[in-house]
Amino acid sequence: MAVMYAYALYQRGLVIQGYKVLEGIYRHCVDFAHSHIYPGIPEYINNRGRGMYTYLTGAASWYMLTLVTEVFGARGVMGDLELDPKLMAEQFDSEGKARICIRFAGRKLEICYHNPGRVDYGNYEIRSVRLDGSMIDLTGVPVIIQRSLITSLKQGMANQVEVELQRLNNKS
C-alpha cells in the first residue's frame, strides 16, 4: 500500500512527499541486515521489518511503474512518448545527470536528464530534447515525442534521448 500511496502522491503533484515515501521504502529494503529482502521490494513486511517474500512482487512492479512514469516522467500518451520528469535534486548524480533505460515502440531508449545546477522539481523546465543527437521541436509542456520519430530509430541498440533542464526564469 505504501508504494501505491507514493504513486498517488506523485499523481497529485505532491512530489516531495512521494519522493520521501519511495526513498524510505528503498532505504529499508536495501538494508539487507535488517530487512532480509533480496531481490526486490516485498509485498508484505512483517512486524520485525523483514520482507516476507524474497522474489519480485506486485509492490516491486508498482515501485517500478512509479519510477518510470512519475519520477522520470516517461509514459505513453495516445501512442506517443511523453516526458514530464519529477526528479528531486538529490536524484541527480555529481554531474547533474539522471538516467533511465526503457523500451518504447519496440526501441530501446536511454533517457538522460541533464540538470547541471541540480535544481529541485518545480524549479526547472525542459529546455531542449535531442533524439540520437537530433534536436526535437518543443511544442508543449510536457514534451511529446511522436511515435513515428521513435520507430524511425535503429533497432537493437540503445537510442539516446538527451533532455536538458534549466532553472525557471522566475525562480532564484
Image (cartoon, rainbow, N blue to C red):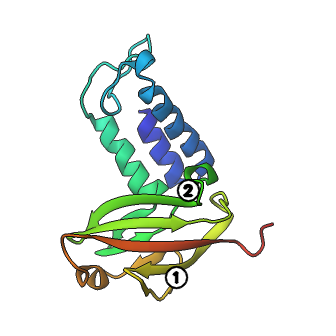
Residue plotted at (44% across, 16% down) = 34
Q: Does residue 156 appear to the left or right of 82 in the view shown?
A: left
Answer few, some or many: residues within 10 Å of disc 2's Cα (few below 14, many 20 plus, some between 14 and 19). Answer: many
Answer few, some or many: residues within 10 Å of disc 1's Cα (few below 14, many 20 plus, some between 14 and 19). Answer: few
Q: Amino acid at mark 2?
A: Leu
- Residue 87 numbered mark, or none: 2
Image coordinates of residue 130 in percent, x first then y, are 44, 80
- Depth check: give the residue in front, 34 or 7: 34
Residue plotted at (70% across, 72% down) = 168
Residue plotted at (38% across, 20% down) = 45
Image coordinates of residue 159 in percent, x first then y, are 31, 73
Looking at the image, the residue that sits furthest to the right is 172
Q: Does residue 157 appear to the left or right of 130 in the view shown?
A: left
- Depth check: give the residue in front, 57 or 116: 116
- Residue 52 numbered mark, or none: none
Label 1: which secondary element: loop
Q: Amino acid at mark 1?
A: Gly
In this rendering, the answer to whether 9 lies above or below 52 is below
Reading the image, the residue beneath label 1 is 140
